[in-house]
Amino acid sequence: MLISVRSIVVGLLSTCLVNGHAHHAPLDSNYRIDVHSHVIPPIWRKALISAGYPVKNGTLYTDDFPVPDWTLDSHIATMDSLGVNYSTISVSAPGLSFLSDAHEARTLARQVNLQMHNYTRTHPTRLGALCLLPLPHVEESVAELKFCLDTLKFPGVGMFSNANGTYLGDASLDPVFEVLHKRQAGVFVHPAAPGCHSIAMGYPIPLTEYPFDSVRAMENLLLSGQRAKYPDVKIIFPHGGGAMPYLATRIAGMASMPAMGGRSIPESVAELSGYYFDTAASTSAIQLTALKSFVGVDQIVTGTDYPYVPVTQIEAALPVIQSNGGFNKSEMARINHGNALGIFPRVAKVLGV
Ligand SMILES: *[C@@H]1O[C@H](CO)[C@@H](O)[C@H](O)[C@H]1NC(C)=O
Ligand SMILES: *[C@@H]1O[C@H](CO)[C@@H](O)[C@H](O)[C@H]1NC(C)=O
Ligand SMILES: *[C@@H]1O[C@H](CO)[C@@H](O)[C@H](O)[C@H]1NC(C)=O
Ligand SMILES: *[C@@H]1O[C@H](CO)[C@@H](O)[C@H](O)[C@H]1NC(C)=O
Ligand SMILES: *[C@@H]1O[C@H](CO)[C@@H](O)[C@H](O)[C@H]1NC(C)=O
């Protein structure tokens, strides 16, 4: 929050002329950064098919949900039509968790990250890449994380609520969080399928299990103590936090019981509300009111979930954020881009604000 306010102030101050040259202008309040958009690199798609993800009538399915057609050109064209100025791009679930061989996972992570790097080099002022990690393989993930942040200079990192059952919060992930914490990295978490598919009753996993898997990850980060251990990682959970704004006080209440460790209720609620939440598929008045009262304006960021969420739904969702959330213009500037720039300072640098 402090960082985003500072970057806005710096943006305003830098409008002055420096040595007679017009310096960086601040961003218009409508300038929109989408922190939740996905690429589907052909090499990743091919690996999913090789691993046995089903192709029905020409369409690939992951988690019983169709993987849409995607090209870099259509990504940029859709950003233009939606009024999205800049997007952070990431790979969606299942990430690389379907590869049991660590070497294979590491190799594909590297190929996908280099591919995403190329996308962003083609559109440097429109796209920034979030590193794909070969989780649950930890040692390989630490190496890839450093490569993405230090060599490729990615603005942030993509992670999943769980990777083949290893949830965020699992002690095996400490080495990854150690690196993220030291660098105060910005992390975008996407939900993944829980291990037990039968709970989806045969419906596509994303329908309800994605939002609840975000809840599981936050819950595990709380109960394992991992979030408290690495508080400097700036973490975005998508879809308005799944069900977390609604469930946090219940979880904190139960976590206060002696059998669960006797945690302080206010401290648990503070921790659970200490994330950023994006607006993907979460722009109804009910959702935005809950989100606003749970985390406040400074932790809400814009997300679309393109191309998995149909463009017609995104077109309807983006323009109603302001009225459904009751936000004023300066609050919208923070939701549109100010908060995101605080999470990803390298994007602020590229945009000159
Ligand atoms: C199969 O794909 C074709 C072409 O994309 C489409 O017209 C048809 O409706 C699909 N059939 C089923 C059963 O989904
Ligand atoms: C941001 O996108 C809007 C809508 O496409 C466009 O009108 C505006 O010029 C863009 N702003 C910048 C700074 O590129
Ligand atoms: C996922 O975890 C299960 C149980 O630990 C293991 O048997 C399986 O090989 C793992 N799958 C992959 C793709 O790593
Ligand atoms: C990225 O672009 C460079 C230069 O255009 C090219 O040599 C390289 O093969 C590309 N890498 C990937 C993974 O597409
Ligand atoms: C917008 O609301 C904030 C409270 O969140 C208030 O401090 C600010 O003055 C308002 N700005 C405008 C332009 O009304």
Image (cartoon, rainbow, N blue to C red):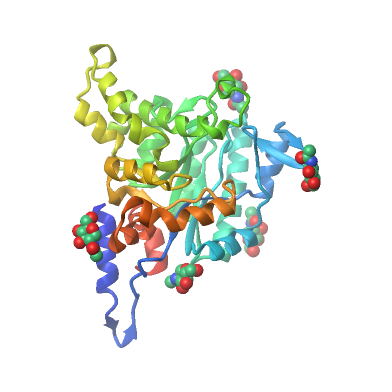
Name the quadrant containing residue 259.
top left
Relative to the observer, which residue lies in front, 91 or 268? 268
Name the quarter where the C terminus is drawn: bottom left
Relative to the observer, which residue lies in front, 120 or 8? 8
Q: Is 145 left, or right, of 333 in this rendering?
A: right
Confirm whether residue 57 shows in the render. Answer: no
Q: Which residue is located at x 29 percent, y 82 percent?
A: 18
Q: Is residue 22 above or below residue 178?
A: below
Relative to the observer, which residue lies in front, 265 or 318? 318
Q: Is 7 left, or right, of 212 in this rendering?
A: left
Relative to the observer, which residue lies in front, 316 or 22? 316
Q: Is residue 153 above or below residue 277?
A: below
Q: Residue furthest top?
A: 259
Numbered marks: total: 0
Q: Position of residue 254 (x, y in %)?
A: 28, 19
Q: Which residue is located at x 27 percent, y 42 percent?
A: 293
Quadrant hosting ligand 5: bottom left
Q: Is 334 left, or right, of 43 in this rendering?
A: left
Q: Position of residue 112 (x, y in %)?
A: 60, 48
Name the quadrant containing residue 248.
top left
Q: Residue furthest bottom?
A: 20
